[in-house]
Amino acid sequence: MKEPSFTVGIEEEYLLVDRASRELVGEPPPSMLAECEKRLEGQVSPEFLRSQIEVQTRVCRTVGEARADLVRLRRTVAEVAAAHGLAPIASATHPFADWGGQKPTDIARYQVLERDLQGVGRRLIICGLHVHVGIDDDELRIDLMNQAGYFLPHLLALSTSSPFWRGADTGLKSYRLAVFNEIPRTGLPDYFESYGEYSRQLNRLIAAGLIDDGSKLWWDVRLSAHFPTLEMRLTDMTTRLDDAISIAALYQCILAMLWRLRRQNQRWRIYPHMLVKENRWRAQRYGFDEGLVDFGKGEIVPYARLLDELIALVAPDAARLDCAAEVAATRDILKRGTSAHRQIAVYREALAGGASKPDALKRVVDWLIAETVAAL
């Protein structure tokens, strides 16, 4: 059985804020995007809302290559934005922005989305981290997609960065998912027996005029409509670049581990969605604070123990793919906390020091601005 390429591509979505007011910028100057496009040559694009911008790495052989490319992308966007008095923040939500004032980007496909999604679409001031892993064989991609869903809550728990929404502490580590879940064709993908079955169901939607292609399937993990990749989409946008790299490496190794099992005529047990969704909710609600369910044992297990088991499980694959250090660095996220933990800490510390709630939220934005470009 030929080994897939397991190449890596990473997409990051940023929110644009005004450095003085810390507000979202609903109308960034056209010259800013034009300068980014000039300097990044096809690796940057507008997003659904004008206050968002997206970057995409090249196709990379290793996560080390992806990191180097992502450093250049983040740094360039930050430099260009700063020249216009703006800054990107790598966060799944803005701490206090109101979605009612946001406008969609003036591009035909985004105008179609706004028309179709209406109110739930206009709320989408949210940003995610998307990781593509190269798997050329269609049948293998379907098989790995069926199995990979079990591990997605483990990745979400490491990425959380959206505790605030419209100025309120939501009590969730990833409120972004609560917003994203309102649009159609999200969540865990259905189980498919084969690529042929997947294609038949997709073509039914296309033939009925409901969607144009597979890019309108916004599942937690999906077959890319444009590349021979399996794209993971569940995770929040991580504020620290190295957290994004560690999560990408772990996802890459999970797929490699599942392929290795298949080569040995084994496979990961596929659990019903009603069970996996419980872990998805726990990761959304608590991050890694309250553990996830090990359905083999039938009990909640501390997340640190689950992560250690997962790192050990993929160790041969991490060594083969030259990303053992990046996978091991996921433990560092547990030690210092995700962006959601840090945002909440900054907010509460400001309140304890006598700051008003609006000023405390602005300090969170200041922290996000600084942390987005830290260690670049």
Image (cartoon, rainbow, N blue to C red):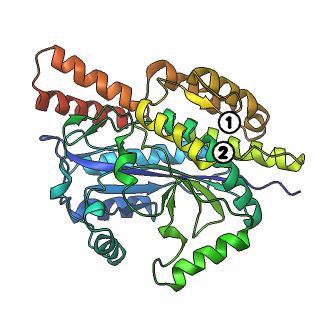
Q: Which residue: 22% across, 49% down?
A: 83
Mark 1 near mark 2, Cβ–Cβ under 8 Å?
A: yes
**100 shown above or below 67:** below
Local packing at callout 2 (Cα closer than 10 Å; few below 14, some 14-19, many 20+) is many
Report the quarter where the N terminus lies: bottom right
Q: Which residue: 38% across, 37% down?
A: 161
Quickly name the residue at label 1.
323
Closer-to-camera residue (277/228): 277
Q: Secondary structure at mark 1?
A: loop
Q: Which residue: 51% across, 52% down?
A: 233
Report the quarter where the C terminus lies: top left
Closer-to-camera residue (316/140): 140
Total tally of numbered discs in the picture:
2
Quickly name the residue at label 2.
252
Local packing at callout 1 (Cα closer than 10 Å; few below 14, some 14-19, many 20+) is many
**Callout 1 amino acid:** Cys
**92 shown above or below 2:** above
Residue at the far top in the pictured view: 353
Answer with left or right where residue 183 lies relative to residue 164: right
Residue 56 position within the rendered picture, expressed as x and y whole percent measured from the top left: 48, 56
Q: Which residue: 35% across, 41% down?
A: 175
Residue 367 position within the rendered picture, expressed as x and y whole percent measured from the top left: 28, 30
Separation of disc 1 and disc 2 at Cα?
Answer: 9 Å
Q: Nearer the viewer, mark 1 or mark 2?
A: 2
Q: Secondary structure at mark 2?
A: helix
Dot 1 or dot 2, earlier in sequence: 2
Residue 366 position within the rendered picture, expressed as x and y whole percent measured from the top left: 23, 32
**Callout 2 amino acid:** Gln
Q: Is residue 261 visible?
A: yes
**184 shown above or below 315:** below
Answer with left or right where residue 307 lies relative to residue 56: right
